Amino acid sequence: MSLLSGKKILLGITGGIAAYKTPLLVRALIQQSAEVKVVMTPSSKDFVSPLTLSTLSKNPVLSTFTAEDSDNPVWNDHVELGQWADLLLVAPATANTLSSMVHGRCNNLLLAVYLSAKCPVFIAPAMDLDMYAHPSTQENINTLKSFGNHVLPVGEGFLASGLEGKGRMLEPEEMVSKVVSFFNPTLELKGKKVLITAGPTYEAIDPVRFIGNHSSGKMGYALAEVALKMGAAVTLISGPSSEKINHPSLKLIKVVSAEEMLTAVQEFYDSTDIAIAAAAVADFKPKKIASNKLKKESGLAHISLVPTVDILSYMGEKKKKQKLIGFALETENELEHAKGKLSRKNLDGIVLNSLQDPDAGFSVTTNKITFIHADFRAESYPLQSKLECAQRIFEQILTL
């Protein structure tokens, strides 16, 4: 279930340049399974199209107190809208709108909805840096907070005026994260740092060819998605993969070789609470990398191989407060080999999957896993999606 499933979000848009980002905000809320309705001030239409917002929200966009229906005016009931919402989010909120909210002005539909709303109100200011820093604006923000409203912080960076500083509206993903945290205050991994390695590594033979494996990264990315939904700050160190993920609490680091992956792990491992080594790191690499492409006509008698760095052993040796989980992909004597790896690498748990199971392992969207604890207790699960497998893995981690 998505973290905003069943929640009714009323988005109020005012006439600031940051309104151009609101279609992305609507889409991000919809992706979390929220129901979204939009109320616009008349001036906001200069910056974003009501047609775009109604298409994305799948609801009519309202901006006036009345609408025409069969040549007769119909009242857009601001009281009903205020009572419908589980949360009112005003984004962007201009300096003019902040002042109107403080002083109870009611000269457009959005302000009437705000004054009628019984639900929590989130406000995302957006304006130029001098307007934001002005004492009257800061006093208005403090007053709105005293009313019980949640005033979001502003971002810092380049502004429409060409100046640089505080005043930018928070990015859509950041606002959604704030809303999710509000509705889910007891997320199991809130405040925790999770490090995940994912995908294959490629070890160069020459500038064109490499030694690698069939890992797609799907399992590691699924683990990252679940950890993010549970409130964690996630560092995902990914070998070459076509998988996509985007979240304000995610730090995605792309690497190619085992050496590059180890370097990234070393940077973040000490501050990690939970580390999951889901990457399929190549076990060997060429002893010497050819500086030019090897020609087929010249032939190739052999490639001398040497072991790659053992990232999981490094993590096990350096482990302090971290909970460390490894993966074992086996083709024979699965449990025996997985338990041996669990002990050798100093792990708190290991996830076993077998290439003998149909529709499990590399490149597919499903997996069949067994979670083995340090005392060799094992919990096996039937074939299910890799996202469901990731949920089961974190259920086990939470018991450690």
Image (cartoon, grey):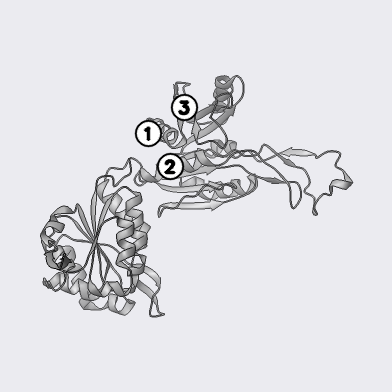
Give the percent coordinates (x, y) of residue 4. 29, 47
Mark 1 or 3: the one toward you: 3
Q: Give how far apart the Cα atoms at labels 3 and 2 are.
A: 29 Å
The one nearer the camera, 338 or 176, is: 176
Give the percent coordinates (x, y) of residue 399. 37, 30
Mark 3 or 2: the one toward you: 3
Contact check, label 3 and label 2, Cβ < 8 Å: no
The residue identified by callout 1 is 398
Q: Give how far apart the Cα atoms at labels 2 and 1 are.
A: 12 Å
Q: Label 3, secondary structure: give it.
A: loop
Q: Amino acid at mark 3?
A: Leu
Q: Amino acid at mark 1?
A: Leu
Give the percent coordinates (x, y) of residue 157. 41, 71
Mark 2 or 1: the one toward you: 1
Is residue 99 visible to the viewer in this orientation of the structure?
yes
What residue do we see at 40% from left, 52% from top? 249
The residue identified by callout 3 is 383
The residue identified by callout 2 is 273
Instruction: Report the disc number at residue 184.
Output: none
Give the percent coordinates (x, y) of residue 307. 71, 37
Count residues near mark 1 (Cα–Cα under 10 Å), then give few for <14, some for 14-19, many for 20+: few
